[in-house]
Amino acid sequence: MRHTIIFLLSFLFISQVAVGQLTNPVSWSFDHKEVSENSYELYFDATIEDGWHLYSDKIPEGGPIATSVQFENTPDIKVVKEFTPTREATKVFDPTFNMDLEYFGGEVRFMMKIEADPAVVGELAGFVEYMSCDDESCTPPAVTDFVFNLGNTDNTEEITEDISVATENDSQSSESRSIWIFLIVAFVAGLAAILTPCVFPMIPMTVSFFMRGGDNRRSAIKTALVFGASIVLIYTLLGALFSVGVFGPNVGSILSTHWIPNTIFFVLFFLFALSFFGLFEIVLPSGLVNKTDSKVDQGGMVGAFFMALTTVIVSFSCTGPFIGYLIVEAVQGGGLRPMLGMFAFGVAFATPFTLLAIFPSALKKMPKSGGWLNSVKVVFAFILLAFGLKFLSNIDQVYGFNLLSRNLYLSIWIVIFTLMGVYLLGKIKFSHDSEIKHLSVGRFLLSLVSFVFALYLFTGLLGAPLKPISSLLPPPSANHTVMATSGQGQVASDSAPECGPAKYADKLHLPHNLNGYFDLEQGLACAEEQNKPAFVVFKGHACANCKKMENTVWDQPEVLQTLSEDYVVIALYTDDRTKLPESEWETSEIDGKTLKTMGRLNLDILMSDYEKNSIPYHVIIEPDGTKHEMGVTYEDDVFVSFLTKGID
């Protein structure tokens, strides 16, 4: 048992470290000194985390990104000694790149010598570009800004470094909070699954299994803990299949955008809803259940594990929708989210079983199985109908059918939640429902919540943005008028972009009346023509986080003004199925396949150029080629700081 507990604690610790870990293992500091009149030495000091290495400034062609320095404006300086390290690099043969490479570990200083008149140059700004790896993975190419004040010996460049680090930390903090919210949702889903009729009646039977032979209470507690740990392990392993890349690096894009998985999920949700309404019962093959159940009689640790496996299998007819929706949401975020989500779900699901097995007397205080369980099941059926509609919406948006408009979607939801409220009042009865002799306070309050939510949805038909649930709804159409609300802005102009009509503008639109482009080459050409930085966002029709950012961050007046006036906006849909002309087909650098659709081409750009496969992902490209990158954030000030980088 001690080993089991140590395993679970170690797993939780490793998971937390993985989530909170900084993605950049190299930190930089900068210094300079005047060695003679108008002659300066510039120092670039890198501190590299243990286990990681920073590539040298001398890397053969075809290798990783070399460490280099670039200045924003250099016409008034003379480079006397090029950017070079002050100590020898470690040289090894790298089988990944199939070449000899030089790198540094620990700490290393790079130095260069310049001549410049401080009265003319003043502040010398630029950035260091670099790439780092450990034994298993590499970070994407990164940049760190610096400023050398040649007229001042104080390290004014540290201010820029602090601002850069602060912005990165805010972004990481926002992403961390997003993960925690997801884990809380997964935990609540695990608790909700306990209340389904497939699971709740199993609690007394399962607890009685642990109390067999009842005199040895210590053994019963030990067996109960192994049972709970086994449930957590089974669900975690299911999530791990999606976290470790078993299904490929773009499984999230496939699950959320391709018509086949979306159709399957919609049908499953619809069938589960009909089953919950009482039309039929979904059961897994009896052979599978009997095979695992036969192992339970072995007793001890082995019996506890197979009891847990049997519980998971038998309860799947009710837990399936919860698990399916969590995994779909998790894989879009990528990384460890699927595994951590299933871990949280498993902990919540296993906790009541385990605690009641340890304290069996508490069973007497639990409500008995009865008609209320069927009511819970019917309520879940209404919710499944509503959430299943999202998968149809994904297909409609990605393939451009435009059949399931926002207003139609909202109308269906209004009907569903109104009917749910009527059911809770006892005005609708299904075959398995018990007679309601009186209306309990709980049912009345739940029906009231359902009616209020339906009324809230109705305001969406009148133009309200419905921000809290915007990620679940289709986006407003191009001619949809959004009701003005506090803090929300709109760009007045809806004319063509400054450089002429955008390709694919007949089917693709930016939110809040923003003008922009949907083709990277066309957008960058316009940015060059206008001498403006380009704001590139990798997004998707079926991306919930994209919609949430656009409706809670982009809609702020300061953000909208900056995007519309100071940037050329380029939206690259990674899930759009528009077929490209054969002349625009490209070969993927990742798998060598021919990229024939807009979405596959844009996803390949994201994965090959930025080593990311989750959206939204934002890139600012300045006129001189300097790039700034950021993932998801729901904090206005963090996003404004990011936008400011490209126009300072």
Image: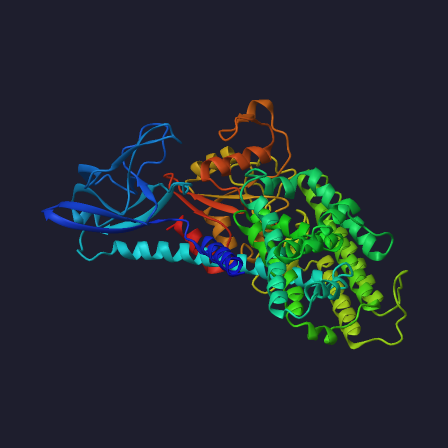
Would residue 400 be seen by someone viewing this image from the given angle? no
Residue shown at the point (18%, 38%) measured from the top left: 78
Q: Is residue 459 left or right of residue 155?
A: right
Q: Is residue 185 left or right of residue 101?
A: right
Q: Position of residue 168 (x, y in %)?
A: 41, 54
Task: Please give the count of numbered marks on the rendered protein.
Answer: 0
Residue shown at the point (74%, 75%) measured from the top left: 364
Seen from the viewer's position, the closer of residues 596 and 351 is 351
Q: Position of residue 570 (x, y in %)?
A: 52, 41
Vertical relation: 164 (above or below) 506: below
Vertical relation: 412 (above or below) 220: above
Q: Quadrant of the N terminus?
A: bottom right
Colour mapping used in the image: rainbow
Quarter of the image for residue 398 reads top right
User: For the view shown, which residue lies furthest in the top direction?
Assistant: 583
Would residue 389 be seen by someone viewing this image from the given angle? yes
Q: Is residue 549 left or right of residue 411?
A: left
Q: Position of residue 208 (x, y in %)?
A: 72, 66
Quarter of the image for residue 195 reads bottom right
Seen from the viewer's position, the closer of residues 502 and 260 is 260
Quarter of the image for residue 484 reads bottom right
Seen from the viewer's position, the closer of residues 434 and 647 is 434
User: For the view shown, which residue lies furthest in the left direction?
Assistant: 36
Q: Position of residue 142 (x, y in %)?
A: 37, 44
